[in-house]
Image (cartoon, rainbow, N blue to C red):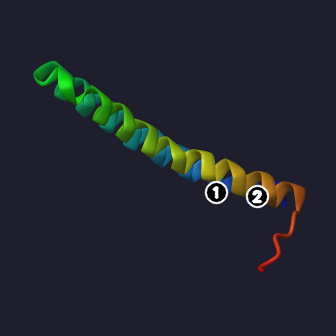
């Protein structure tokens, strides 16, 4: 059961790391060309990281076996 709960975190974490590497590299090149694009590059890098944080939350909920009620 623990492996099944942690598997989404492993898969999404790996894909998120690859995507974040691409976004960060692109952000560095944008900032080198246009310094005013720094905030956009930072926001886009943080946006990719939210997928990994959401996968961590799902894994924790699955491990703790918490049930979320629908309103």
Question: Is the residue marked by circle 1 packed among few (<14), some (14-19), or many (20+) residues within 10 Å?
Answer: some
Looking at the picture, how far across and down is residue 46, in whole percent? 45, 38
Which residue is disc 2 drawn over?
Answer: 5
Res 20 → quadrant: top left
Left or right of residue 71: residue 17: left
Residue at 13% across / 24% down in the picture? 34
Looking at the picture, how far across and down is residue 53, in whole percent? 61, 45
Left or right of residue 67: residue 51: left
Whether 14 is drawn above or below 41: the answer is below
In this view, which residue lies farthest toward the bottom?
A: 71
Tell me the quadrant of the picture where the C terminus can be found.
bottom right
Left or right of residue 53: residue 49: left
Res 27 → quadrant: top left
Whether 58 is drawn above or below 49: the answer is below
Q: Secondary structure at mark 2?
A: helix
Left or right of residue 42: residue 27: left
Question: Is the residue marked by circle 2 packed among few (<14), some (14-19), or many (20+) residues within 10 Å?
Answer: some
The image's mark for residue 8 is: 1
Q: Nearer the viewer, residue 58 or 43?
A: 43
Residue at 73% across / 54% down in the picture? 59
Q: CA distance from mark 2 to mark 1?
A: 7 Å
């Amino acid at each position: 059961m623990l492996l099944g709960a942690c598997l989404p975190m492993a898969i999404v974490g790996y894909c998120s790391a690859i995507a974040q590497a691409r976004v960060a590299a692109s952000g560095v090149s944008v900032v080198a060309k246009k310094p005013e694009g720094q905030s956009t590059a930072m926001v886009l890098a943080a946006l990719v990281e939210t997928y990994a944080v959401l996968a961590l939350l799902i894994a924790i909920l699955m491990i703790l076996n918490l049930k979320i009620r629908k309103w």
